[in-house]
């Protein structure tokens, strides 16, 4: 198995993929109430599931990377994942909507910067990043912001 730092690229790309999917599912949503009522809650449920997946990926990111990029509020991401998974009925839709419409933009930009930095420092493999770009698994990742 690869060292934790070597797996970080995969986890970061997965998070970017999930962000892209969430935005696809919520692009026509203009208010928290719309998120709840739209499409019989299918888009809400899918988005919350992906937010939980983001938190799970954050749990798998190496402590070295988290320490190197402390501006990202890693513990808050994990805490929201725990809220979604363990207290689904207690989720505040206004908070979830805010995360989707505001916080994910900041996170996306930060993760793209982390990937670019780690590619430049040769911590991540450029060849691996290009393979990911050409795969069918990362269709919602904006690779032009990374490469």
Image: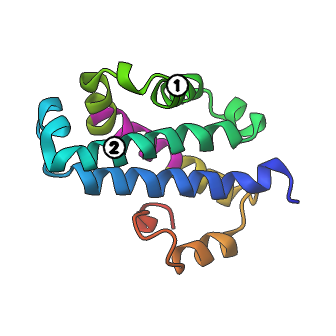
Left-right relation of 62 to 111: right
**Quarter holding residue 129:** bottom right
Q: Is residue 103 left or right of residue 143?
A: left
* Quarter of the figure with the N terminus: bottom right
Residue extending farthest to the bottom is: 134
Q: Quadrant of residue 31?
A: top left
Horizontal side of residue 31 vs 101, given as left or right: left
Using the image, determine if residue 134 lies above or below residue 120. below
Residue 45 numbered mark, or none:
2
In the image, residue 23 sits, relative to residue 145, either above or below, namely: above
Residue 58 placement (x, y as % from top left):
61, 39
Q: Which residues are magenta?
A: 102-111
Element type where label 2 sits in the image:
helix
Alpha carbons under labels 1 and 2: distance apart: 14 Å
Nearest the viewer among 120 and 77 is 77
Magenta-drawn stretch contains 132: no
Residue shown at 61% from the left, 78% from the top: 131
Mark seen at residue 86: 1
């Amino acid at each position: 198995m690869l060292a934790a730092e070597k797996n970080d690229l995969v986890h970061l790309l997965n998070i970017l993929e999930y962000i892209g999917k969430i935005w696809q599912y919520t692009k026509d949503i203009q208010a928290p109430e719309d998120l709840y009522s739209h499409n019989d809650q299918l888009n809400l449920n899918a988005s919350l599931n992906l937010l939980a997946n983001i938190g799970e990926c954050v749990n798998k990111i190496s402590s070295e990377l988290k320490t190197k990029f402390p501006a990202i509020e890693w513990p808050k991401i994990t805490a929201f994942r725990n809220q979604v998974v363990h207290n689904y009925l207690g989720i505040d839709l206004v908070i979830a909507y805010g995360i989707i419409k505001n916080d994910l933009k900041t996170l996306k930009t930060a993760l793209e910067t982390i990937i670019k930095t780690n590619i430049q420092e040769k911590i991540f493999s450029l060849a691996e990043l290009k393979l990911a770009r050409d795969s069918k698994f990362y269709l919602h990742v904006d690779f032009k912001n990374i490469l």
